[in-house]
Amino acid sequence: QVQLVESGGGLVQAGDSLRLSCAASGLTFTMYAMGWFRQAPGKEREFVGAISRSALSTAYADSVKGRFTISRDNAKKTIYLQMNSLKPEDTAVYYCAADRKLVPRTSVEEYDYWGQGTQVTVSS
């Protein structure tokens, strides 16, 4: 049974930083590219960032480029999202997802497994 468990969300002020984690189990972690998505109230789920199996390739949404960094530790079967210079518009539930492909992809429909999400709230 595949499980993706996110952690690290919380309430912060604009300009602060947060680091999200996503621990995976029940899958061969090195065979999956991994991604972060987010969903704000009343909005569709949107791509944030993704990382290839080997961590050699990453992709980011324009809205987070230069502020967010995705990384992975294959030994720990965990991915991370370092979020700096947070803005109120970053407020959302953040989800990690696994994609049985080599390279990072940006579409929700392309991912095979999803976590339950962690809430990030940024106050102004």
Image (tube, rainbow, N blue to C red):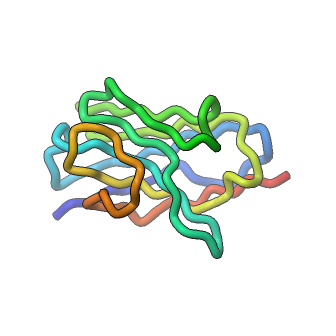
- Residue 45 shown left or right of residue 63 in the figure: left
Q: Residue furthest bottom?
A: 42
**Residue beneath the point at 60% across and 40% down:** 62
Counting from the top left corner in percent of width and height, residue 15 is at: 78, 38
Counting from the top left corner in percent of width and height, residue 105 is at: 35, 46
Q: What is the number of callouts on the image?
A: 0
**Residue beneath the point at 62% across and 56% down:** 120
- Residue 43 shown left or right of residue 76 in the figure: right
Q: Quadrant of residue 71?
A: top left
Closer to us: 6 or 107: 107
Picture layout, residue 1 above or below residue 75? below
**Residue beneath the point at 73% across and 38% down:** 16
Counting from the top left corner in percent of width and height, residue 49 is at: 47, 43
Quadrant housing the N terminus: bottom left
Q: Quadrant of residue 65?
A: top right
Q: Quadrant of residue 82?
A: top right
Closer to us: 100 or 7: 100
Q: Residue furthest right?
A: 124
**Residue beneath the point at 30% across and 57% down:** 111
Picture layout, residue 96 above or below residue 72? below
Closer to us: 82 or 109: 109
- Residue 31 shown left or right of residue 22 in the figure: left
